[in-house]
Amino acid sequence: MTAERTAAIVAAALVLVSALGSAPAAAATYEELGDPTVETTVQGSDVFAPGESRTLTVGLRNTGVTVTSWDGRVSDLAAVIESQGIRPGAALSTAAQVRAGDAPLDVRTGRQSVGTVAADADARVPVRVEVDENATPGVYRLPVEVQYRYVETIIVDANRQHVARNAETVTRHVTVRVEPRARRSVAETTGAGPTE
């Protein structure tokens, strides 16, 4: 869900206030059907050489599709959504940790927090990777553990405001390649040039 759709929800709530203002006071509810889906990719190069040490950038993208519904006084819901900065479909308090798995390398960066990842939005997680000197060339999958929270339900009545959030932990993977270093020629190694 895009930022434009979020704005449309709040705008619709404000427009409907006059129509609902005369209704008797009752609990208002808001629900999100579906939850964020965070996918992972490699941003930039995924190729390493044995003995190489550099940064691998892992991209997080929220591809989840969320349908929202509400009932009751829309103005009450709109006030809570706006005051608490709720963004429909967003992955909240998002954190990620990349692990080596079976790959012949060490991941030197631990768990990192990236905050909120809105629907259809991206975040980046840079991690330091050190490949073993004797690493066997090949393709390897690195596990990425992603943790986040999301809003499920909002209930508002005369006496309380209740925002129910769920927590999710998923494991995704990114793929890297280890390629052998290019061999240097004898001339490059010894400094000898061609002879006539």
Image: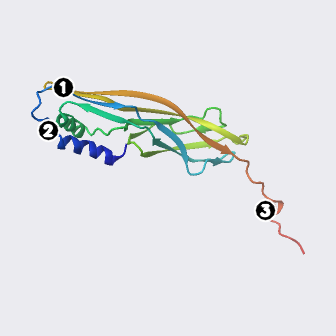
**Foreground residue, 109 or 144?**
144
Q: Residues within 10 Å of mark 2 (few under 14, many from 20)?
A: few
Amino acid found under the numbered disc labelled 1: Ala
- Residue 158 occupies quadrant: top left
Task: Label 2: state its secondary structure.
Answer: helix
Which numbered marker is on residue 19? 2
Question: What percent of the width, then of the height, locates residue 136?
Answer: 73, 40
Quarter of the picture containing the N terminus is top left
Which numbered marker is on residue 27? 1
Question: What percent of the width, then of the height, locates residue 139?
Answer: 68, 41
Amino acid found under the numbered disc labelled 3: Glu
Circle 3 is placed at which residue position?
188
Question: Which of the two labelled residues, at mark 3 and mark 2, occupies the earlier sequence position?
Answer: 2
Of badges 1 and 2, nearer the viewer stands 2
Most extreme residue toward the right is: 196
Most extreme residue toward the left is: 22
Question: Which of the two labelled residues, at mark 3 and mark 1, occupies the earlier sequence position?
Answer: 1
